[in-house]
Image (cartoon, rainbow, N blue to C red):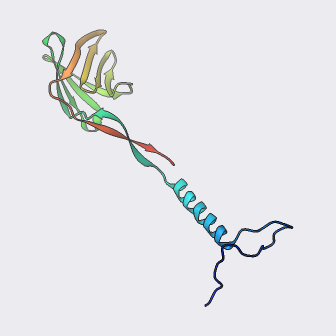
Amino acid sequence: MISAPLTLDPEPIDAGAGERAASPFVRATVMAWLAVLGLAACQTERLSPGLETTILPATIEYGCDEGRKLRVERAAEAVSARVTVGTRSWTLPRADSAAQEKYAEGATALYLDGDAALFESDGRVLAANCRSATPLPRAPTLRPYRF
């Protein structure tokens, strides 16, 4: 099948007096760009590197004020944590917080933020100014964005 070649400036088609209609080439180009933009808008999400955050391992040993030692054992997927200060232990469920991670139940709470930790129970701070005994790795978080 032989077709007529596309021209960049054809004669007006159904144009009003003194107006020029868009050529098939221009219409095809515009339609192609609209299709590309439509597909980009359909993308569900992409990931972009965000701020760096500390990667918390399953078990962390902290050194705190007054020579206290704090041991935190985080459960799989960080749904709970077992906290040990001296000879006493508590198991706490994960709670919402502005800190990187918070575990709390009643008046007992553990706050983890980077390589720092704080533990309180019944209105008393049992482990303050705690720092991880070993450096913890850091990596950028991946945040979704849309076009």
- Quarter of the image with the N terminus is bottom right
Residue 79 seen in this snapshot: no
- Horizontal placement of 30 versus 54: left or right? right
- Residue 117 sits in which quadrant? top left
- Horizontal placement of 116 versus 6: left or right? left
- Horizontal placement of 135 versus 2: left or right? left
Residue 15 to residue 146: above or below: below
User: Going by the picture, which residue comes out furthest to the bottom?
Assistant: 1
Q: Nearer the viewer, residue 23 or 112?
A: 23
Q: Nearer the viewer, residue 26 or 60?
A: 26
Q: Nearer the viewer, residue 70 or 88?
A: 70
- Horizontal placement of 121 versus 8: left or right? left
Q: Position of residue 12 (x, y in %)?
A: 78, 73
Q: Position of residue 146 (x, y in %)?
A: 49, 47
Residue 33 to residue 111: above or below: below
- Residue 138 sits in which quadrant? top left
User: Going by the picture, which residue comes out furthest to the right?
Assistant: 17
Residue 130 seen in this snapshot: yes
Q: Position of residue 126 (x, y in %)?
A: 22, 12
Residue at the location (70% across, 73% down)?
9
Residue 94 to residue 64: above or below: below
Q: Nearer the viewer, residue 68 or 20?
A: 20
Q: How many marks?
A: 0
Residue at the location (81% across, 69% down)?
15
Q: Position of residue 107 (x, y in %)?
A: 33, 15
Residue at the location (23% across, 15% down)?
129
